[in-house]
Image (cartoon, rainbow, N blue to C red):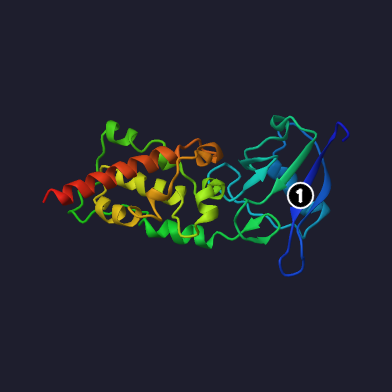
Amino acid sequence: MRANEVTYHVFRFDPEVDKESRYETFRVPMRDGLTVLDGLIYILENLDNSLALRFSCREGVCGSCAMFINGSYRLACQTQIAELHADDVYVSPLPHLPVIRDLVVDMTVFFEKYEKVVPYLLNSEKPPEKEWLQSQQDRKKIDEVIDCILCASCYSSCPMVWTDGRYLGPAAITKAYRFVADSRDRGASQRLSVVDSEDGVWRCHTIFNCVEACPKKINPTYAIQQMKKKAVIKRLKFWER
């Protein structure tokens, strides 16, 4: 690699045409602040306009550009080439998800599981005149988990997801905890009924891959363990009746 260039090795696969996947090599002009996503866009616009990839906000908020970059789960828009400390950049789609084409994966099942946990506030009480108030102490309970951007990195990294297609996965259960822990929500019982099963919280084996993979530094394993506690408490209360 020349000092003014960076070498990209990009995963290519079109299931409608290709029998096997492959990596194609591209050389991208290097500059200060160049991100992996910047380089991919350069390839798309100048070298190969058939390259398929997802991106949107370019601010680390939408989660669209989650990829497997140099052996780690990363957001392409937040990963600067200089920080990789490597002569070559290897870019692949999220592992263990069906590839639609190149770097684009099928997120259908991921979002179907997400919808099962009812990912929005449930409260049938008469609403206040302005808004539901929340103390600083109550807000701290969801400070971390509320940052989930649904990039599916944790889901892709989870061995239980790989081996059990029915498992809800860390993202959905973490999102369930985000609302159960929210002082304004009244849907805890409904969500616990969804996650308290062999395909829910009890399928988690606390391997911590999800923690390592999360680009927002969220701890899904902690959220899952909290949901296990709440599920047990709910069962004990039922038995005490």
Q: Say which of 211 and 196 sits in front.
A: 196
Which of the 4 image quarters holds residue 29?
top right
Residue located beneath label 1 in the image: 10
| Image position of 97 (left or right of 43) | left
Q: Which amino acid type corresponds to the residue marked 1 in the rendered image?
A: Val
- Looking at the rendered image, the quarter that the N terminus falls into is top right
Q: Say which of 95 and 67 sits in front.
A: 95
Q: Circle 1: is it few (<14), some (14-19), or many (20+) Cα within 10 Å?
A: many
Q: Residue at x 43, y 56 (%)?
A: 114
Judged from this view, the residue extending furthest toward the right is: 2
Q: Residue at x 74, y 43 (%)?
A: 90
How many dots with numbers? Answer: 1
Q: Residue at x 70, y 39 (%)?
A: 70
| Image position of 8 (left or right of 197) | right
Judged from this view, the residue extending furthest toward the left is: 241
Q: Say which of 112 and 185 sits in front.
A: 112
Is residue 151 visible in the rendered image? The answer is no
Q: State the image coordinates of residue 183 (x, y, percent, origin top left).
A: 26, 42
Q: State the image coordinates of residue 159 (x, y, percent, origin top left).
A: 54, 48
Q: Residue at x 51, y 53 (%)?
A: 161
Q: State the image coordinates of residue 96 (x, y, percent, origin top left).
A: 60, 54
Q: Is residue 67 above or below residue 165?
A: above
Q: Say which of 145 and 123 sits in front.
A: 145
Name the secondary structure under disc 1.
strand
Q: Is residue 87 above or below residue 123?
A: above
Is residue 74 visible in the rendered image? The answer is yes
